Image (cartoon, helix red, strand yellow):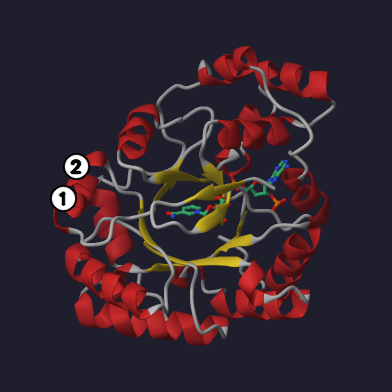
Amino acid sequence: MKHYILNNGIKIPALGFGVFLIEDKKICIESVVTAIQKGYRLIDTASVYMNEREVGEGIKVSGINREEIFVTSKLWLQDYGYEKTKKAIDKTLQRLQLDYLDMYLQHHNFTDNLGSWKAMEEVCREGKIKAIGVCNYPIHALKELLAVAEIKPVVNQVECNPVFQQKELHGFLKENDIYLESWAPLGHGNKELLSDLRLSRIADKYGKETAQIILRWHIQEGKIAIPKSTTPSRIQSNFDIWDFELTEEEMNVIRSIDTNKRMGPDPDDKEYKKRIASYVVDI
Ligand SMILES: NC(=O)c1ccc[n+]([C@@H]2O[C@H](COP(=O)([O-])OP(=O)(O)OC[C@H]3O[C@@H](n4cnc5c(N)ncnc54)[C@H](OP(=O)(O)O)[C@@H]3O)[C@@H](O)[C@H]2O)c1
């Protein structure tokens, strides 16, 4: 397993396990246990995924020490603002049955993100959160945050896959010593992407699956990837990417797949923002 050192000195696994849309409680617990037992040491949840309790349960059941697992959760929009953020962090910790989080992220660039950031900085100084960061921040929002932040974000978790590589944003993040963490690193399981001939030719050479080639590409680009699966064989194969290395030529082939077009929604789109703002999580 490869690790990176974040800008606050904390070590983060380069590959993690995402749990978005694992709604069934039993399946969520089982998937987290399977992932941890197969070697994953980073679990990415969020209050809006409504499965923090199951993630906490899975961590307990896995039999692996909590200290060995990097746990991430996220602030949902209804909890933005200084006071509400502090309460939301405590509730997340309660649901996870943990006394600290390894990383806590703002789920979006949203109203009073700076008030929330101040609260996150304070909780980080108290030690209840080891690292703080953001998701879905475009460059302009990062600049605004960096201008006032006392603690710099350690990651920006954004949509990223071979079709939408976020080259400009990644360049900006590298300049600022912030890691890009790829959500939907497999394009949300997109069939066209996973059967792309350029990827399958590389996969055949190494006796691997295209998903493994994609995940290896994320890591060799210096990004953190957090694939989700509830299929035990895929949980395993998505983790088996440490025994080969893509050549620079192969990296360039994958870089050329970029269309700079999102598969998911544009987090900066006003209509999208309005829509998600009305999504209140009852947890
Ligand atoms: N911050 C944000 O705004 C944000 C947004 C979206 C996601 N995320 C995070 O990123 C994580 C990953 O994103 P995601 O779940 O949307 O997409 P993803 O990991 O790119 O893809 C997951 C989908 O691909 C399938 N899959 C997984 N491994 C596969 C393989 N080896 N071969 C073929 N299909 C495979 C899964 O199916 P099965 O489960 O049926 O195997 C699932 O349908 C999330 O779980 C969440 O933690 C964050």
Inspect this view and state whether residue 79 appears: yes
Indicate if the residue with disc 1 has its beta carbon within 8 Å of ligand 1.
no
Given residues 283 and 18, the one toward you in this image is 18
In percent of the image, x 52 and y 74: which residue is there? 50
Callout 1 amino acid: Glu
Residue 56 lies, in percent from the top left, at: 62, 78
Secondary structure of the residue carrying numbered label 2: helix
In percent of the image, x 66 and y 18: which residue is there? 247
Q: Residue 124: which numbered mark, if any?
A: none
Inspect this view and state whether residue 283 appears: no
Quadrant in the rendering for residue 251: top right
Q: Is residue 3 above or below residue 70?
A: above
Q: Which residue is mark 2?
A: 140
Given residues 111 and 8, the one toward you in this image is 8
Secondary structure of the residue carrying numbered label 1: helix
In percent of the image, x 29 and y 67: which residue is there? 278
Q: Residue 144: which numbered mark, if any?
A: 1
Residue 81 lies, in percent from the top left, at: 21, 74
Given residues 280 and 71, the one toward you in this image is 71
Q: Is residue 160 above or below residue 39?
A: above
Quadrant in the rendering for residue 171: top left
